[in-house]
Amino acid sequence: MKRFIESICKTFNCDKTRLLDIFWAIQEKYSYVPQKTLDLLSHKLKLSIPELKDTLTFYHFFHQKPSGKIIIYVDSSAISEIFGLNKIISSFEQELNCKMGEVDPTGQFGLFKTPCIGMSDQAPAALIHGIPVGKLTTAKIKKIVADLRKNILPKVQIKNKVQLRGPVLFEKHNVGESLDLLYALTPDQIIQEVEDSGIRGRGGAGFSTGKKWRFCAEQKEKQRYIVCNADEGEPGTFKDRYLLTKNPTLVFEGMILAARAIGANQGLIYLRAEYKYLKGHLQSILDQMQLQNLLGNQILDIPNFDFHIRIQLGAGSYVVGEETALLESLEGRRGEPRMRPPFPVEQGYLSKPTIINNVETFASVSKIIKNGAHWYKKFGTSSSPGTKLLSVSGDCAHPGIYEVEWGLSIRQFLKLVGATNTLAVQVGGPSGQCISLKEKNRRLSFDDLPTGGSMMVFSKKRNLLNIIKNFVQFFQDESCGCCLPCRAGNIVLNEQMHAILSSEAAEVDLQRIQNWSKIISASSRCGLGQSCTNPMISSMQAFPEIYKKNVKAHESLYRPFDVENKTVAYEQVVQLHEKES
Amino acid sequence: MKKKVNITIDGKSISATPDDNIVEVAKANGVYIPTLCFYPDMGKCLGTCRVCTVKWKRHHVAACTLKVEEGMELTVQSDELKDLRKALVELLFVEGNHFCPGCEKSGDCKLQALGYELQMTVPRFHYRFNNRIIEYNSKKILFEHNRCILCKRCTHKFKDSKGRRVFFFKGKGCHLEVEMVTELVDQLNEEQVDHLVELCPVGALLKKGKGFDRPYGERKYDKTPVGQTTETHPKPSTKKHKGLL
Amino acid sequence: MTKNKKVSLATISLAGCFGCHMSFLDMDMKVVDLVDLVDLHTSPFNDLKDFTQKVDVGLIEGGVCNDENVERLRSFRKNCKILISLGECAIMGGLPALRNNIPLKDCLEEAYVNTPTTDTQKGIIPHHEDIPKILDKVYPCHEVVKIDYFLPGCPPSADAIWQILTDLIHGKEPQLNYGQIKYD
């Protein structure tokens, strides 16, 4: 063990910022991170054990006790839930002979839940030893477990269903095509073109990409970085999975253009751990690009234009999708959002000016540079130019990937995806808006209904409150805990949701939820806390009748308090002692 | 020196130096912004408790994270903001187990003092009766995790003589905890231990062997509201005690 | 509440130590003034256990630790127009709630079986149909019934009790000054 730890420390140069890689290496060898390895690491890296655990315990894919040689993570998203999550869990429990959250008696298999793994188009799904398997059924699970017992792992079989090939990202593109313009355009002209296109960040926040690049280029510090946010964590989205599987060069080209624009020589892709299976594929593409002189030193023989891209694997955390949390994680620490200012363009990765953009943003930029800002602005609306990749899931005839122009109305959307008998659309995932068909004339755009891509459709046969509860639970689990309103507030909201579902709440509780939600979102430190109240608030607005039906009109003077139930423990102790004597 | 600019807080005009911290600027001008995790003169703020939330341009911002800018117009005291702060303090009271009658820090506790000031009689949220550990292995410090408010003061504002961090976080979300490096805590000198205990705004970190040392009525916040007191602890000297050779 | 008619008052101590009741008596000479303002009904002060009529104000000391507490508290809710949680125990369980994180079995065994003062060979955990059944945890009163006002403190000072009572008697929303709200 000592030699192994020494060798991995050597591989990563005893670099503390590579702590995630080091833990991954350990976990790959021992299937968990044994205490002994921490002792050795502590010695080697000159960090105390609590300091190592500071990072280690933040990420839910790292285990500190034996958790099975093969770990099965069942996707617990709302979409999985409506497509039979509970049945899937009991099938796994039965086949593996262990409960959810436990290791089977042989110690071979571990069974855990994890939030959305980016497979909502093929729900219910699970990650089996890092391999995504979709459309799970009891029969399929039987076969998978039987195979696993024979040491046969399932094959990676992602069915990317592209339902609508749009005009921008699906336009015919040869590898490196956008880079041809590197000879013609100065860095400043690249930024100008991006600025002129009016493209706004595709991750959700919608900040102007051109402005971001311009700010970064204006910094005094010359050492700069490009970071691609491939931590697609919003439940219900899988469009980055599609881009990274089918068209990663487009993304890399965007990063190279950004590097040229601001003069960066190092790029990083933060790949969410759920997409670990893509790492090999992406690395081989990067290697190929290096061979084609599209990456590496003197790219396309342009003097002094060196740019390298490294893939950093995450380890399971939704909040890391927030750009400053992502930076913390890239530096080998807990993924807690930083305080802003300073913004990443001023002090980002390793405190140097850094551009962080979403996978889709980089891919779109390649097209903008290739075809020009003018071409790009032909699509979409004036305030939201261009197109948007949507990940469509839930109750519709055609789930999958759609590239649509901004400005699409919900009515058009529902027709497009073949949704009938629709109750609600969750636009932009749990952190977005839950809307009813009364709002079907609203349009997807930054000034009306923004979306990072997640579009979940729910039909009238679904229990909306269960879905909202799933979202609230998700935020509770994924809060980093560093600021109070989000850490403790989500628990309070979850309790209230529970009370509503168990018919214990009264109408006055709905008002309380509204008031408390305002406080939580107003005082939280980052986007997670600020948007964690959206599911409840927007669904209460869209479906007041559903909530009303589940609560009492008046709060009783007598609170629900089950004495019988609360004296069971006492009765048991008394009985036990009676028996003994 | 930078040129002074004008800002207003609750309508009061204040002349201030750009980039100065809003909480301190307000204080220097007789405007009190309630804080909890904020620690004066300590560089980067922590921004964890959010009690100092104020309004600026219709947005809510934690004042401790704000720097003076020309023409700023801030609202500190409004019914809405008072209720927001009260709710945050109440969240802390239900999140941990704050049995004030049995706590040595009672009377000197900043959380409690804020409760008094914001006139909290009962939290609007359910008590959770969380079950965290009480750590007594250190020779110098008793760590009662049930009282910890996870403010990050000890994890980020406390260093030992060699400049090492002694406290870290463990877990996340509602499972978040502070973990101390017991070996390092045991190497702290008397002065450092006193500073550490002062640094903890609540009764989570207690000096072993100290117990209750002042009668009711003579404690820090018994008669003086927290807004009228100052938190100016001397920075611990880094020189080591010679010991009793 | 009208100014001329006397206000009826009831008090009770649930899972408390009677400290709040002692603090009430600590009003010294103000007790005499209070007699002019209130009629005392069900209360440990006069040893009246049952309600004979509806009363205006009920003061609750102590949290809820057994089934009898629940019953008594509900009866107070039924018979009092205004209920006030008096002291830390009523508000949040107080020191008795320190047991909330210890399994009930361990608590009972420590108290009745393993303690050095157990006088028989083998300790017995009290149980009889006439003895209240212990709840799994100690609960704040407002988790059982609606409570209208809260006066924290361990105990609340006589001054604060006087303040909240006289404010209510004079039909004012109770206003407590700095020092009157305290948690210890």
Image: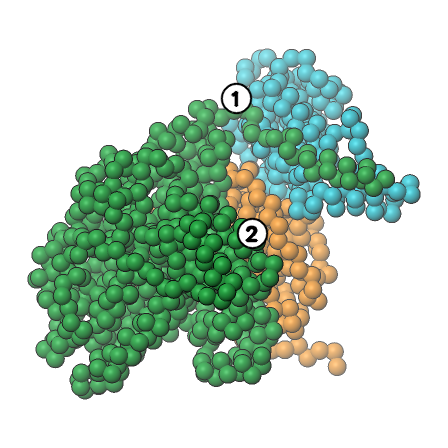
Chain colours: A green, B orange, C cyan
Q: Name the mark nearer the viewer: 2 or 1.
A: 2
Q: Is residue B108 above or below residue A248?
A: above
Compare residues C33 and C151 and report the one nearer the observer.
C151
Q: Which residue is mark 1?
A: C171
Seen at 61% across and 73% down, the residue is A36
Q: Is residue B128 left or right of residue A417?
A: right
Residue at the image position 32 percent from the left and 65 percent from the top: A229
Q: Residue A21 appears in which quarter of the rendering?
A: bottom left
Q: With A359 as the anchor, is A135 left or right in this view?
A: right
Q: Secondary structure at mark 1?
A: loop
Please tell me the numbered disc located at residue B237: none
Q: Which chain's residue wears label 2?
A: A
**Vertical relation: A263 (above or below) A68:** below
At mark 2, the secondary structure is loop
Q: Return the x and y of residue A181 as percentages of the image width and height.
A: 12, 75
Q: Quadrant of the N terminus of chain A?
A: bottom right
Q: Which residue shows up at 13% across the image and 76% down it?
A: A180
Using the image, determine if residue A10 lies above or below residue A399.
Answer: below
State the residue in front, A362 or A507: A362
Amino acid found under the numbered disc labelled 1: Gly
